[in-house]
Amino acid sequence: MKRIMIYYHSGAGSTKMVGEIVKVLLSKTFAVDIMRVEADYNYRAMDDYDFFVFGFPVFGFKVSPSMSEFVDNMPEFEDPKPCYIYCTLGLAGGNALYNLAETLHTKNMTVTGYEKVLSPGSDASLMFKGKWARSLKKKTPAKIMNMVQTINNAMKGGITSSVPRFKYGWNILEKLLMGIVKKEEKKMMGSLRILTDKCTNCGMCITTCKRGCYTKGENHPLLDISNCEFCLGCVHHCPYNAITFLKDEIDKPRLNEKFFKAEKEKLLARLVVNEGTQ
Ligand SMILES: Cc1cc2nc3c(=O)[nH]c(=O)nc-3n(C[C@H](O)[C@H](O)[C@H](O)COP(=O)(O)O)c2cc1C
Ligand code: SF4
Ligand code: SF4
């Protein structure tokens, strides 16, 4: 049986959820594994797979730092390896998919398709005032079916390169906005803190943050943001809402395991119905 590996990076959980659903659907035909990208990954493990999927969230119009570092550190392969790429995003992804495809190309990987999926609950729900949509987008099931079909076709021998187009407009907009985005991000990241009166020292943030920003402390973990990518994983997944970066967001609902479990069930139910009617 042919083997597929899905590599993802995810802060809140949208990108992980999409990868897990794709895994469920592809597992009917292939042996599929899924894993979050790791800084100390042994890339030789890639020899065991026939096809790869890379999923990442867009942060500031760019590939998330964790995914970017993961592919940058990947060796260049002797024989071409086929892959598929997707991102999740709140609004606009700039040239992020194109940029990832470019890096993968330098590693001798052939990108056979790509997709962008709006996240079911945007991080903007925490960053800005007001109410934001926090449920599945209409087009999401069709987008996931498209991902699965494209990967199925490629696995059946239809390996052709299909890469996102570079858009100059995005590049100009990115250059114009990047200063503001970076400034805001730095400000919010600098305000990331533990509310010590709410913290139970459960240690969840230490395991959630794969960039080593939290370490064990006597009454509560210690936070060092020098390697933080502002993925918001710790904020969403603290069981006691004890991690915050803005005072407005303290009591806002989080995109946690429970949220994504419900979204995943809804999506899978719709996808199974869609498959049955095809
Ligand atoms: C720091 C930060 C920057 C973001 N920048 C963008 C962006 O430039 N464009 C966009 O459409 N969404 C942006 N988003 C929203 C995320 O891409 C979106 O919520 C994504 O689905 C998160 O995936 P995850 O849940 O797997 O982390 C940003 C989110 C964060 C936390
Ligand atoms: S996850 Fe939240 S409650 Fe648990 S140790 Fe971290 S900050 Fe404290
Ligand atoms: S400390 Fe930064 S990198 Fe670590 S989980 Fe929180 S936001 Fe993400």
Image (cartoon, rainbow, N blue to C red):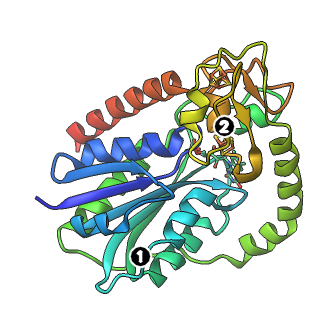
Residue 188 to residue 61: above or below: above
Q: Position of residue 159 (x, y in %)?
A: 27, 76
Classify mark 2: helix, strand or loop.
strand
Q: Position of residue 96 (x, y in %)?
A: 61, 66
Q: Does the rendering let one see residue 263?
A: yes
At x 81%, y 35%, the residue is 128
- Inspect the image, locate mark 1, and give the three-letter code of the amino acid beneath it: Ser
Classify mark 1: helix, strand or loop.
loop
**67 horizontally vs 31: left or right:** right
Q: Nearer the viewer, residue 136 or 155?
A: 155
Q: Quadrant of ligand 3?
A: top right
Q: Nearer the viewer, residue 190 or 117?
A: 190
- What residue is pinned by disc 2? 214
Report which quarter residue 72 is drawn in. Answer: bottom right
- What residue is pinned by disc 1? 162
Q: Which mark is residue 122?
A: none
Name the N-terminal-most of marks 1 and 2: 1
Q: Position of residue 127 (x, y in %)?
A: 78, 36
**217 horizontally vs 106: left or right:** right
Q: Disc 1 vs disc 2: which is toward the camera?
A: 2
How far apart are labels 1 and 2 at the CA level? Answer: 40 Å
- Inspect the image, locate mark 2, and give the three-letter code of the amino acid beneath it: Tyr
At x 50%, y 71%, the residue is 73
At x 38%, y 78%, the residue is 109
Q: Position of residue 215 (x, y in %)?
A: 65, 36
**170 horizontally vs 26: left or right:** right
Report which quarter residue 255 is drawn in. Answer: top right
